[in-house]
Image (cartoon, rainbow, N blue to C red):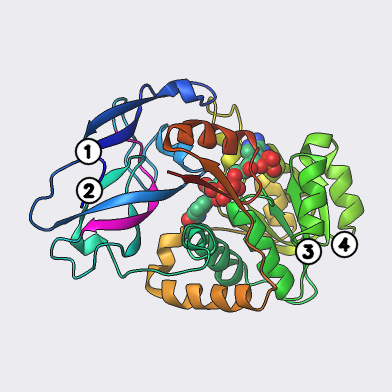
Amino acid sequence: VIAHRENRRVLLRDVPAGPLTPDHFTVETAPVPQRAAGEAIVRTRFLGIDAGARAWLQSATYRTRLAAGELMPGTGLAEVIDPGQSGLSAGDLVVCETGWQDYALVPVGLLGLPRYAEPPTHLLSVYGNPGLTAFFGMIRSGQPARGETVVVSAAAGAVGSLAGQLARMRGCRVLGIVGGAGKAQRIVDELGFHGALDYRAGDLRGQLKAAAPDGVHLYFDNVGGEVLETVLLAMAAHGRIVCCGAVSQYDGPAPAHGPRGVPGLLITRRLQMLGFLVSDFDADRAVGVEALETAVRSGELKVPEDIVEGLANAPAALAGVLAGDNFGRRIVKV
Ligand SMILES: NC(=O)c1ccc[n+]([C@@H]2O[C@H](COP(=O)([O-])OP(=O)(O)OC[C@H]3O[C@@H](n4cnc5c(N)ncnc54)[C@H](OP(=O)(O)O)[C@@H]3O)[C@@H](O)[C@H]2O)c1
């Protein structure tokens, strides 16, 4: 039974030319959609807020570019309201593309199986895309080995916080790069990073030299731009760089230049740079989730979540992620 007859929908008002603000969005109210054959109706309970969503507004990525007036896309943790022919029951929880709205029509083939976790928000963090990105990016792509020095950027974020801990669990010495002294303290105290560097405090190159005098063996890059340029200078010979994302480049005009010194450094230090998409590992998602569940249950892997209340606050929640005001996975409680 659908208790609410209205569906709030957050639409992109216009494509931002500079930093994203809540004014780039508008909230409309529409009737709850009618289900057609082959569809189910779900009610969004929580939305995962991805830093990468900013890039979807700018150009085609692994998604087509979003246009003004369209519903903001996003992954939701949703309750099945009307299961249609999906074989699920009303009340089941599923993780699916809901977009930023109360009610979504989902093709039954895309609903998957009912999911359970305690707390349920872990389905959007550690057992969702951020956790799997951290797992497949760090473990499969980066292959961290005991004793190596590993650096992770955006280390207090959804992906970075987990990627760094996974490397620590492999016996690496892990340093996180974050913006601000408060986050630097927290990733050490709460997440067990061995050290933290604050790129906003200046002289990141000097901080890296002091913290990793023998060089960085593996760099997990969420940020690109200047931070990547600086870490490249700190790489040890035969070091690896896993390119996960470039959040420093999403929220403004295209940069005038990329990291300087890339060809020279790559050659003289025999570095390897490897990009990946979490979807490359779709066939192994269950393996990833199982490994992450074991790590969480053992108490070794902490899962920071940063929950914002209210669908109408989703735009501000995304702008905040880009400005770095989140600690861990940002989630909107719809
Ligand atoms: N390859 C894949 O398949 C895949 C999948 C999912 C996500 N990703 C990527 O993973 C990265 C993290 O995404 P997320 O959703 O987990 O976001 P997140 O890390 O929770 O949030 C983004 C963080 O980036 C930092 N940041 C923002 N601007 C920065 C700048 N100019 N320089 C340095 N740091 C900056 C901020 O923290 P500070 O306060 O520390 O600056 C902010 O908290 C993104 O690059 C995303 O595109 C890749």
Q: What numbered label is drawn on residue 330?
A: none
Q: Is mark 3 on a helix, strand or loop?
A: loop
Side (left or right) of 48 relative to 249: left
Cα–Cα gap, marks 3 and 4:
21 Å
- Is the residue marked by circle 4 packed among few (<14), some (14-19), or many (20+) residues within 10 Å? few
Q: Is residue 195 visible?
A: yes
Q: Name the residue under label 2.
A: 2
Main SS of the magenta segment? strand
Q: In which quarter of the image is ligand 1?
A: top right
Cα–Cα gap, marks 1 and 4:
62 Å
Looking at this view, is 330 or 166 the one in front?
A: 330
In the rendered image, residue 243, in percent from the top left (x then y), is placed at 58, 54
Q: Name the residue under label 3.
A: 192
In the rendered image, residue 11, in percent from the top left (x then y), is placed at 33, 30
The amino acid at mark 3 is: Gly
Cα–Cα gap, marks 3 and 2:
45 Å
| CB contact under 8 Å: marks 3 and 2 | no
| CB contact under 8 Å: marks 1 and 2 | yes
In the rendered image, residue 62, in percent from the top left (x then y), is placed at 37, 48
In the rendered image, residue 285, in percent from the top left (x then y), is placed at 43, 71
Cα–Cα gap, marks 3 and 1:
47 Å
Relative to 173, does residue 219 appear above or below in the rendering?
A: above
The image quadrant that residue 80 belongs to is bottom left
| CB contact under 8 Å: marks 1 and 4 | no
Q: Is residue 261 visible?
A: no
Mark 1 / mark 4, whichever is N-terminal: 1
Mark 3 / mark 2, whichever is N-terminal: 2
Mark 3 / mark 4, whichever is N-terminal: 3
Looking at this view, is 73 or 237 the one in front?
A: 73
